[in-house]
Amino acid sequence: MVRRTMKHPSHMPKLKTNKSVRARFKVTKSGILLRRRVGQDHFRGLKSGKVRRRLRKYARVSKAEAKTLKRYLPYR
């Protein structure tokens, strides 16, 4: 009896999602990538309230970077 290593040899293998990219970025339904703003981890007391409120919101990733990052998120 011949043993096959793959069930369906004609199928392409699954692509792996990069977990670090998945954790750092959100993808909207329209496919726009959103990232967290920088400067939130420490020294928040030195920043004004206006700046802290602005930092809470997500920022869009540029088109050039989004194209690269979407390769790491094949099923999103």
Image: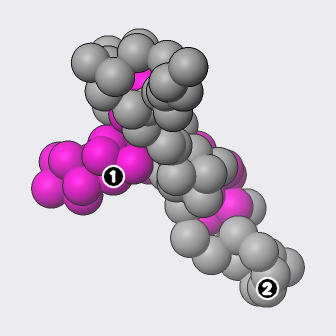
Q: Position of residue 43 (x, y in %)?
A: 79, 85
In which quadrant will I find the C terminus? Answer: top left
In which quadrant will I find the N terminus? Answer: top right
| Magenta stretch prevailing secondary structure | helix
- SS class, disc 1: helix
Mark 2 → mark 1, Cα distance in angstroms = 29 Å
Q: Residue at x 40, y 15 (%)?
A: 8
Span of residues in magenta? 50-76
Pointer 2 or 1: first along the chain: 2
Q: Position of residue 20 (x, y in %)?
A: 60, 58
- Give the residue pinned by disc 1: 69
Q: Position of residue 14 (x, y in %)?
A: 44, 31
Which dot marks residue 15?
none
Which residue type does callout 1 highlight?
Answer: Leu
- Give the residue pinned by disc 2: 43
Which residue type does callout 2 highlight?
Answer: Phe
In the rendered view, does 31 fall on the left or right side of 21? left
Number of numbered markers = 2
Q: Measured along the vertical axis of the image, is residue 32 above or below residue 52?
A: above
Using a 10 Å C-alpha cutoff, classify the residue at mark 2 as few (fewer than 14 neighbours), some (14 to 19) or many (20 or more).
few
Nearer-the-camera pick, 69 or 74: 74
Of discs 2 and 1, which sits in the foreground? 1
Q: Position of residue 51 (x, y in %)?
A: 61, 64
**Residue 25 belongs to magenta span:** no
**Residue 57 belongs to magenta span:** yes
Q: Is residue 70 visible?
A: yes
- SS class, disc 2: loop
